[in-house]
Amino acid sequence: MNKYIIAPSILAADMTQLGKEIAAAEAAGADWIHVDVMDGRFVPNITMGQFVVEACRRVTKLPLDVHLMIEKPEDHLETFVKAGASGLTVHVETCPHLHRTLGHIKSLGCRAGVVLNPGTAIGAIEPVLGLADLVLVMSVNPGFGGQGFIPESIARIRDIRKKLDALGSSAWLEVDGGVSVETIAQLKEAGITAFVAGTSVFKYPQGIEAGIKALRSYL
Ligand code: DX5
Ligand code: ZN
């Protein structure tokens, strides 16, 4: 596995060509495929669910990095694991029993991720930093692709990187939102090891392969 993960978000893919777009990303060296599940409640949009995860599972061997932007994610963990998720990432804002939920994900043999919104204090995830296999920092407010990167995210990433290092944690530190050739170098420098990228891969003007190559050239 690469030291730095590029995880194209299919939210930005052409949905009429999803299989082909995923195959193109895989051929271009994507490491994981990021699937944004939204419920129209926790976030304004409704996107895709377990049937799309199942369909992705049939067209690629890459790990499926499933980002659950839904209320009560604990009710759907088995469903998404059965559908083929390799990692499930839950929002601290939706999980009153975060410790239990992460433990449950791990018990299903799945990578357990926790994610926090730009407006959520880092302290909210501190008690589970030793348990999480992945920590995702939102660098936009979740719910839409193609938004501008929030620059204050860098200081938050540095802070979480320090805390993970102090614990000796080997968890992935992932970022999601506005990752592009303009932002990726500073994100790497701040300690990110996994980069979600929607627009800058699937809507890259020169195509998916060029988009991934452009990002990788900074890693
Ligand atoms: C936003 C989603 C992201 C989104 C990123 O709520 O979680 O994964 O697809 O899109 P870009 O890379 O275009 O900012
Ligand atoms: Zn996402």
Image: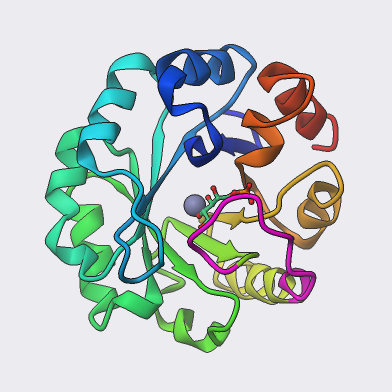
The N terminus - image quarter: top right
The C terminus - image quarter: top right
Q: Position of residue 74 (x, y in %)?
A: 18, 65
Q: Is residue 160 above or below residue 36?
A: below
Question: In the depicted view, which residue is nearer to us: 77 or 180?
Answer: 180
Magenta stretch bounds: 141-155
Who's the residue at 23% across and 68% down the image?
A: 101
Q: Position of residue 129 (x, y in %)?
A: 46, 72
Q: Is residue 112 magenta?
A: no
Who's the residue at 40% across and 58% down the image?
A: 45
- Left or right of 165 in this view: 126: left
Q: Position of residue 118 (x, y in %)?
A: 60, 76
- Left or right of 16 in this view: 175: right
Q: Is residue 178 above or below residue 33?
A: below
Query: How does the figure colour the protein chain or chains?
Result: rainbow
Dominant SS of magenta comes to loop
Q: Is residue 3 above or below residue 190?
A: above
* Quarter of the view holding residue 81: top left
Question: In the depicted view, which residue is nearer to us: 16 or 54?
Answer: 16
Q: Is residue 143 magenta?
A: yes
